[in-house]
Image (cartoon, rainbow, N blue to C red):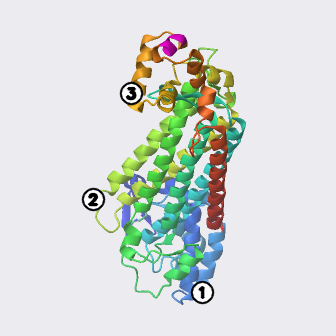
Amino acid sequence: MKEKDILGEKSEINLKAKQFISSLEFDEWIFEADVMVDMAHIIMLMERGIIPEKPGKKILEELEDVKYDDLSEEEDVHVAIETYLKNKLGEKVSGWLHTARSRNDEVATCIRIKSREEILETVNKLLKLNKALIKRVEEHKTTIMPGFTHLQHAEPTSLSHYFLSYIQSFNRDIDRLLDAYDRINKSPLGGGAFSSTSFDIDREMTADLLGFDEILENSMDAVSTRDYIHELISSLSNLITSISRIAEELILWSTKEFSYVDLPSEFTSTSSIMPQKKNPDVLEIIRAKAGSVQGNLNSVQTTLKALPYAYNRDLQEITPNLWKSLKSCQDSIYLIKEILKGMKINEGTLKEQSQTGFIGASELANYLVKNRDTPFRRAHNMVSQAIEKSKDYQEIAEFLNVEEDVVSDVMDPETIVQNKKPRGSPSKEKILESKSNLEKEIEENEEKLNERLN
Ligand code: ARG
């Protein structure tokens, strides 16, 4: 079966083929951006006297009312909007719209506009997450717990030290996203199919109307690059990979074996067969979404690799990876925030656990360095042997030839943590200092977000 559309005689395309190459489903993301692009373009065409005012104004009026749901099934949103205008106004009027442009510069502009909006929304959500974490830091300034390396008890730390580490990492994600924003905020419109146009258009004017910082000068690069999608998904992938590590830890921490936290019931689900179950499904899906976003990044990279200049339809297949990644990230940021906010922290268990597994052993070695003039490597060896050969603190003390209460005092997790004074360490003093530094960064990031929102 063949169909005709506004693209004319040559577009007698097989229906299955048309559906196959259609991007309309995912173009819902750029629908509003496309209407804005159409408006800016028409205004510029009228201003430059490239098209007559009368049809231009009619098109503008009609564009005010168009809804995504009113569009017919076309190859993409650009053709669908033009078809809509043709049905409303007749081709004598609507036919002026696509003067001096191509869908190639049009779609590139739309993706950049929508990306801008979505980046700022993602940053906004990250800021809320960081603020929620600051609250938890305040509640748990001195909550002591075991820290891990190789998932084995390593050294005691404070829970607030964990939370601050997340904040510091999310601040870097915000930096990366805002950085990408600034590179994205340049207008490809006027690039045409790739070699611009012989009409006397005003690229700066459309860039200005659409809120871009400037134009993306070379018209070939303007329409054919998707490096900004590559870059943005890479940042998103980085971000959600960090979230997946937190999700994984909370899954572990909420097991009977750890019992460090109780997850908020609203963010768990039950089993259809085992009535006692409270499953961390939300955290598991967050963990899995990180895999999907990494997959999306891989799709973009492999599709772009060795793709000849300028425009190829392959580029269309890249775009949905971005929308899906943004949605996964934004949902995950919101959900991990709610879980971190709502989970109950079992301070008693954390404290108890921070006393097990000779977790203060490094500090005992440090004691020998500080008080017995022993080089660290030798002290490390002595403590390691003492632990291996002894069953309790008394035997360790005998082995090392120190008073018994020295061992228990030096290995006391509370004391260990509070004695750590370099910047960024887990003692209360340094937690408060880091908290205030990171809060300052959050405020600065908030300002950067607001500058870009205005
Ligand atoms: N929907 C396309 C995309 O997302 C834009 C259309 C360009 N089509 C073309 N045949 N040049 O890339």
Tell me the CA gap for discs 1 and 2.
44 Å
In what quadrant does ligand 1 lie? bottom left
Residue for badge 1? 53
Name which residue type carries label 2: Ala
Name which residue type carries label 3: Arg
Give above or below for 72 relative to 40.
above
Q: Position of residue 192 (x, y in %)?
A: 41, 76
Q: Position of residue 381 (x, y in %)?
A: 39, 24
Q: Position of residue 101 (x, y in %)?
A: 45, 76
Name which residue type carries label 1: Glu
Q: SS at mark 3? A: helix
Task: Tell me if residue 283 is in the magenta stretch.
Answer: no
Give above or below for 331 relative to 369.
below
Query: Which comes before the other along the chain, label 3 or label 2?
Result: 2
Q: The N terminus lies in which quarter of the figure?
A: bottom left
Whether label 1 touches label 2, CB < 8 Å: no
Q: The C terminus lies in which quarter of the figure?
A: bottom right
Q: Residues within 10 Å of mark 2 (few under 14, many from 20)?
A: few
Residue for badge 3? 378
Which quarter of the picture shows residue 431?
top right
Q: SS at mark 1? A: helix
Residue for badge 2? 306
Give above or below for 51 relative to 129.
below
| Residue bounds of the magenta highlight | 394-398
